[in-house]
Image (spheres, grey):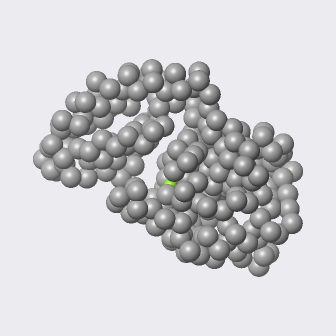
Amino acid sequence: MNLWIFDFDGTLSDIVSDREAAVLHPACRAVLEALPGRPGNIVAVLSSREIDDLASRVPLPDVILGGASGLSWRFPGGIRLLPGDPVEKRRERHRKALAPILNRLSAYPGVEVEDKGWSVAVHYREVLPDATPMLEPLLAELAEVPGTRAYRGTYAVEVQLFRDVSKSFGVRRLCRLLKFDPPRDRVVYAGDDENDAVAMRWVLKKGGIAFCVGGRVRIRGARPVDDPAALARAVRDLSEGT
Ligand SMILES: [Mg+2]
């Protein structure tokens, strides 16, 4: 059996500055439509987006969707797994803990704070170079809020509201739900950022294959591809055994 797991933003969609504008790349859509029809293939898209947001961007009924890095799931046939009340209560507590530092950051000239539901992104591309050193202590403080985890990207920090929920958590949870047993079963994972990196390392350790899109992170053993179109070609070749 092969389990194919794809991140969405930057992996199946080209990077866009407006998160609302991200769309499934046509070449990737063709691959996602073809793969589940071949015997022995299960296909999933795992995103940090909310599950309904992801579902609107990946309208493919044969593909498993994982939202909030694997806290919510939608399976073919419409079966859903939702996080539940205790998880929602924990999310509110962590939001409250982050609020003071986020308020200070959003008052900083050039900083934009983006609420993504299960994570908060702090963008600082527009901060003037002279003002960047003064921003560092605030970013360091942001990385230390208990229970949460910060991932540093290019001109942005993404704070996951749950420290222990990452794409690696999502991949492991999906394997359990499907009774998938790597390395007996093969997992292929494609992603593009720090959150995906933990999942890629886990997949590689389990004898699977990882595709790293766009060169934004480097993972030893992962196969680099330039963009979503190149990923679609590489996945098609791999699935056809060429
Ligand atoms: Mg991504």
Residue 9 position within the rendered picture, expressed as x and y whole percent measured from the top left = 49, 57
| Left or right: 86, with 152 as reference point | right
How many numbered badges does the structure rendering display? 0
Q: Quadrant of the N terminus?
A: bottom right
Identify the residue shown where x is 45% and y is 39%: 117
Q: Is residue 78 visible?
A: yes
Residue 200 showing in the rendered view: no
Q: Quadrant of the C terminus?
A: bottom right
Q: Which residue is the extreme one toward the left?
A: 130
Please tell me which residue is depicted at 51% across the width and 50% down the height of the picture.
53
Residue at the spot 30% in from the left edge and 41% down from the top edge: 113
Decide which of 206, 167 is in the foreground and name it: 167
Q: Outermost residue, front direction? A: 78
Q: Indicate left or right for 137 with 12 as reference.
A: left
What residue is drawn where x is 86% and y is 66%?
A: 39
Q: In this view, does 161 lie above or below 19?
A: above
Q: Residue 46 at what x, y percent from top left?
A: 61, 50
Q: Where is residue 176 in the image (x, y as percent from the top left)?
A: 78, 39
Q: From the viewer's perspective, is 57 left or right of 78?
A: left
Rendered location of residue 79, percent (x, y):
74, 44
Give the vertical position of 194 relative to 143 (above or below). Answer: below
